[in-house]
Image (spheres, coloured by chain):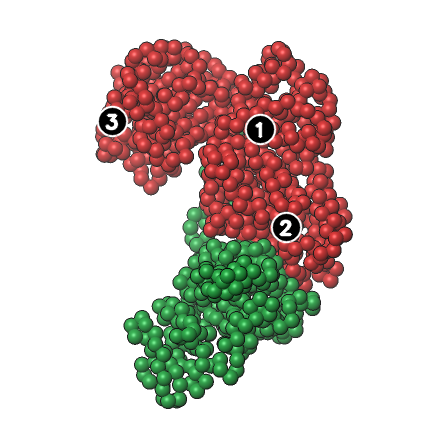
Amino acid sequence: MEIKLTAKDFSSNLPVKWCPGCGDFAILNMMQKVLANMGLPHEKYAVISGIGCSSRFPYYVNTYGFHSIHGRAAAVATGVKLSNPELAVWVITGDGDGLSIGGNHMMHAIRRNIGLKIVLFNNRIYALTKGQASPTTEPGTKTKSTPAGSIDYPFNPARFAVGLDCTFVARGIDNDIAGTTAILERAARHNGTTFVEIFQKCVPFSDKEFDPLKDPATREDVLLRVEHGKPLVYGVKKDKGIVFRGFKPEVVTFEPGQVPAEVAVYDETNAEMAYLISGFSQPKLPVPVGVFRSTDKPSFEQLYYDQVKHVGDTKEHELETLLSGPDAWEIK
Amino acid sequence: MNGKKKTVNVSELSSVTVRFAGDSGDGIQLVGSQFANATAVAGNDLSTLPDYPAEIRAPAGSLAGVSGFQISFGDDSVMTPGNKPNVLVAMNPAALAVNLKSLDKGSVIIANSDAFAQASLEKAGYKTNPLEDGTLANYRVIAVPANALTENALKDSGLLKPQVLKCKNFYMLGILFWMYGLPLGPTKERIDAKFGKTPALAAANFKALEAGYDYAETTELFDARFQTRKSAVAPGKYRNLTGNEAAAYALITAAKLLKKKLFYGSYPITPASEILHTLSKHRANDVVVFQAEDEIAAMCATVGAAFAGELAATGTSGPGLSLKIEAIGLGVITELPMVIVNVQRGGPSTGLPTKTEQSDLLQAIYGRHGESPLAVLAASSPADCFTTTLEAARLAVKYMTPVIVLSNSYLSNGSEPFRIPKLSELPKFDLPPLPAPEAFKPYQRDPVTLARPWAWPGLKGYEHRIGGLEKAEGTGAISYDPENHQKMTDIRAAKIAGIAREIPPTRVTGPEAGELLVLGWGSTYGAIAEAMGEARKAGLTVSSAHIRNLWPLPPDLGGILKGFRKVLLPEENSGQLRLLLRSEYLVEPLGLNKVQGQPLNSDEILAKIREVLGK
C-alpha cells in the first residue's frame, strides 16, 4: 500500500526552541519533507540524538524519537537498529556531540556499516554550552574557551567518514535547500551507514562562519558541486575545473562551455577520489558539497541476521531443550 | 600393568574436596570440569571453583602461572567448593608450592613426579625435591610418574610426543576416578564431544583416563578408596552450570517468557565475558548479541534495544559498571526496562580482575548522579544466578526500570548442579498495560506499580519522544518546572520502593529471635550455610538469614534485625551492607569483613560466630 504523507505530517507541533535565524530550522524543514517522501509510515521511524542544539531535533518530528545523552546517539541507535532492522533509524548529531565526546561511537558505527542515517550539523562551535571551541573550530578562532584563538587542529568531518570507508558520505549547506534535500533523499535510500555533514549557521556563536559559501553573488566561485559522472566544474561562469596531477589537485580555467578533457570526472564509488575531494579547502581549492562517496556493501544488520541462520546453534529450540543442553542428567 | 588385584578399604564420606593444580597450559580447567560432571552424574551434589591467573600463559612452571580448579562433592552438606582440599593433584612443583599452605596435615597429595626435575624445582623456589626430602612427611604423598606412564599407555596412538604428553592430565584424572569409584562411560561421551573434530585426540585422552584408572586399581600406591554419600536432591533433570552460564540462560528464558528477542550488548571484561560467549552460541533462538566498541556503547545500545521494545540486557564487571553509569541514569529517567549483570571483582580500578569481591554494592544502589533509584538483586550461588537474573528481568519489565544483578567472580566461575525448571514452574511476566493509542501518554502510570506504559517504534499510533531531560508527569514532555521535578523524583523513588511488595518473607533459619543472627547477601550464602551447620552441630544457638533483594530491602528485614541482640554481617567488602542497614534501620550489626580477593570461608565465619557468642 502506498502511503501519501506530507512534510506537515512529520511536524510534532511542538514549539521549536532554536534561536531565530538558526540553520537548524532549514534542516528540520528539509528532513520533514524527505521523511514524508519515503513511503514509510510515521511509526517506522526512530530519530535518535545526543546532546546539543541539533539534538533537540527528535522533539520536532512526529515519529518515535529519543533524545539521549552527550555523544551516545550512534550507540543508542545501534541498539535500536539491530533490535529491529525494519525501522528507519536516523541519528541527529553535531560536531561536538558526534566527533568529540561521541567520536568513538561514530567511528565504530561507520566501521560496521550499520544502517544508521547520520546527519551531523556542523556549526564549528559548542553552541548549547554557549560558545566553546569544538573539534571542527577553525584554528585561530576566538571563543570563550579559546580567548587567544584556538590552537587545535580541526577535524574535517566528511574526510573523517571517508577515511573510515563509510559507504555514503556527503556534505550539504543549511541554506542550499535543493542540493541538501537531494543528498538527504539519497541518504534515506542508502543501505548501510550514511554520513551527511551539513554546514550550519549558529547565530550567536558562529554567525559568519559559512558566509562566503552562501552569498548568491559569489558562492559559485568557491563552491564545488560534486556530481557522480560529471566533470568537476565550478565558478559563477562555470569556467573553472579540477585536474588531478597524480594525487595533486589543481584548478584550471577555461572558456565557459569548453571543458578540457583533463578535467576530472567525479566517481563517487572511488574511495581515493572521495578522500582527495573531501580534503579540499579554501583558499587554494573550492569547498566541495554533494555526495562524495556512495558504494554498496552489506550492512551490519544484514550480515548479522544472515549469519545467525547459518552458524552455531541454528535451531529454534523449545525452552526446556535449550536449557537442558547436551549434558543434562536425570535424578529420579 | 602387573594385573595384581589387591583389597582396598572403601570409606564413606559426606563430602570430599579435591583441587587440581598445574600450569595454566596443563588443561586443569578441562579435567576439573570433566571430574565435576562425572561426580554429578554419579548423584553427588557439588560446587566448583576455578582459580586461574590473570595472565593467559604465564611462564611455564612459574608460581604466577599456576591454575587451579577446586571441587567439593558429596551429599547435601556441600554448599561451597570447600575450604581446604582433602586431595591436591599437583602437576608440577609450582602447583605444590602455591597450594601446600592450604592443605591440612594428613591430606593426600598426588603429584606428577616426572615434573619434579631440577629446573622446575628451582622455578618453584625448591632447593631439593619436596617429594623426597621429607618436606611432605605429614602428608600422604602419592608420586606418579605421569609423563612416562602416559607415554607408555599411548605408545601405539600414533600421536607425536608433545600431543601424548598433553594427555597426562587425563591420566591423573583416571586415578581420581578410581579413588572415588566414578564410572568412565559418561566421561567418554563428553571427551568424544569435546574433541569431536580430532577423533585421534579423543581416543588418546580417553585411553589415558582408562590407563590412569587401571594404574590406580593395580598399583600398590593406593590403599584406600572412597565413596561419597549421595545427595538427596529433588528429582528432575539437572545440568552443571557456572554462575555466568546460569545468568545467560535466565536472560534467554526471560525473553522467551515475554515472547521477545533478547538483546545483549556487552564489551569483553573478566569475569563477565562468559555470559557474552554463552549467549553468542544461542543467537538462533532470538538472541541478539552485540559486542560493542566499549562499555559505554554496550550500555547505550542496551538502552536503545529497550526503547525498541526488546528484552534488553548487558553484563559487565566493576570498572565496566563505572563506565556504564551515565547511560544507566538515562535508563532510569526514560523508565525503560533492562537488566545489568555486574560480575563483581576485586577493585578499585583494574584491581584484581580474576578475583572475587562484593564491593560494588553501594555503587549499584547509589552510584549515579542525581536522585536515581533502581532495583538491585544479588545472586547467592552459581545456580541462583538463574533465579535471580530471571527475577531481575521480571521486575524490570513490570516496573519499567533498570535492575542491577550483583554476581561476582566466585559465583560466575563456580559451578553447581542446576535443576532445569519446567515451563509451568517459571514466574509469570507482566507488562504494564498499554492503553489504546488515543489514550496513550508516555508517562501515564499504572496506579499500583507506578510503571509507565511501554510503546516501541513500529507500534502505530504511539509515536512519542523521550530522552534524558526531565519529563512532565503524564505527557512526558520536557519540563523544567520545579514542582514537577520534585514530583517526578518522588514518583521514581516510590516506584522502586514499591518493588518491596514483590519480595517474599525473609526466611530465618533457626530461632526467629534471640541472641545472634548471621545475615548474609550474595555469594557468601554457601559459606554461611556450612558454618551454620557446624555451629548447630557444636550446640550453638544461632540463626541465619540471606537476602536477595538489596534495593529495595525486604520489608520485614528491620523487624527481624531488631529481634536479635546481635547481628553478624559477613561481607567481602569493608562493610557496605552494614552501612546501609545502619542508615535504614538504626541498628548496629557486627561486621566480618574480608577484602583479599578470596571468598569468605565457613571456618572464618564459624570462628567469628564463636567469638561473638563467647563460646
Q: Nearer the viewer, mark 3 or mark 1?
A: 1
Residue B161 visible, this angle: yes
Q: Are marks 2 and 3 on the same chain?
A: yes
Callout 1: SS:
loop
Q: In terms of depth relative to the viewer, which is nearer, B56 or B462?
A: B56
Chain coloured green in the rendered structure: A
Crowding at dot 3, Cα within 10 Å, few <14 / some 14-19 / many 20+, comes out as many
Callouts 3 and 1 close, C-beta under 8 Å: no
- Look at the image and give the colour of chain B: red
Residue tagged by mark 3?
B151
Q: Amino acid at mark 3?
A: Glu
Q: Which residue is located at x 55 percent, y 51 percent?
A: B300
Q: In terms of depth relative to the viewer, which is nearer, B6 or B438?
A: B438
Residue A2 visible, this angle: no
Q: Chain of mark 2?
A: B
Residue A5: give x, y in percent of width and height: 63, 73
B157 sits left or right of A40 in the view: left
Residue tagged by mark 1?
B574
Q: In terms of depth relative to the viewer, which is nearer, B95 or B581?
A: B581
Q: Are marks 3 and 1 on the same chain?
A: yes
Q: Amino acid at mark 2?
A: Leu
* Mark 2 to mark 1 CA distance (whole Å): 33 Å
Question: Can you say which quadrant of the picture contains the N terminus of chain B?
Answer: top left
